[in-house]
Image (cartoon, grey):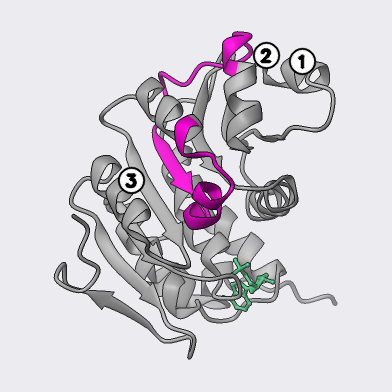
Amino acid sequence: GVQTCALPISSFVPEFAALGLSEPLLRAVASRGYSVPSPIQRECIPAVLNGRDVLAAAQTGTGKTAGFTLPTLERLLHGERARSTAVRALVLTPTRELAAQVADSVRAYGRHVDLRSDVVFGGVSANPQIDRLRGGTDVLVATPGRLMDLHQQRALRLDRVEILVLDEADRMLDMGFLRDIRRILALLPNGRQTLLFSATFSPEIRRLASGMLHQPVHLQANPDRKSTRLNSSHLVIS
Ligand code: AMP
């Protein structure tokens, strides 16, 4: 007869399981075909699960998106679901292309969990976005300008945000989003967890990071794909 495979999914992706991710997320990882975590994922996932803030020097291609998405979903799984226009995890990206791409990843990694995710960006009508936000969103991926517009229209509330991710923070500053980011930060609870990803570290990025991160774990995904956990003296933020 037909033999069913009784092995738990965690035995197919043991190195991801060892990082502390639970079964529904491991299933999504396995179905994407990943066998081992990338160096940045190896460092970032446990740090985020431990509630730490993270400051990561990481470029596209390092696996940073899964590095912040998987542990964010894991943490959200253990709390109450979002209600009435509230947002629990906010991922800011510089462009709508990146927002759409990150939102696709959030959907893919979250396909076996009952968390709601959404994406908002400018250049398209706000009304469908406002309708979708009405019931609350566990993970919202957004560009800063449209997020502020929607907040001003009371389409969403940010006073319950548990986790903030800034993806490609250097590009957001290059695109002139510093003011919006500062306004958004002022709306978030102080006790939130913050993860900042940037390819480069200008004085402006360091200043932003030092104001918004609380004793962050410093990570660097080197171009040779080896990730290092730095002591605080390396990526000095002042
Ligand atoms: P990112 O740096 O987040 O843009 O990811 C770059 C690419 O690496 C994406 O196509 C991911 O699907 C892929 N990726 C992410 N994590 C892994 C992994 N652990 N193993 C293999 N590929 C991965």
Number of the front mark, 1 or 3: 3
Q: Which residue is mark 2?
A: 134
Assess whether residue 174 is covered by the magenta stretch.
yes
Ligand 1 near label 1 (Cβ, under 8 Å)?
no
Q: Position of residue 223 (x, y in %)?
A: 49, 85
Q: Which residue is mark 3?
A: 208
Q: Position of residue 236 (x, y in %)?
A: 20, 65
> Which is nearer the N-term, disc 3 or disc 2?
2
- Which residues are drawn in magenta? 151-179
Crowdedness near tag 1: few (<14), some (14–19) or many (≥20) residues, C-alpha within 10 Å: few
Question: Looking at the picture, which amino acid does disc 2 mark?
Answer: Arg
Q: Picture quarter containing residue 31?
A: bottom right
Residue contact between numbered discs 1 and 2, judged by CB atoms under 8 Å: yes
Question: Looking at the picture, which amino acid does disc 3 mark?
Answer: Leu
Crowdedness near tag 3: few (<14), some (14–19) or many (≥20) residues, C-alpha within 10 Å: some
Secondary structure of the residue carrying tag 2 is: loop
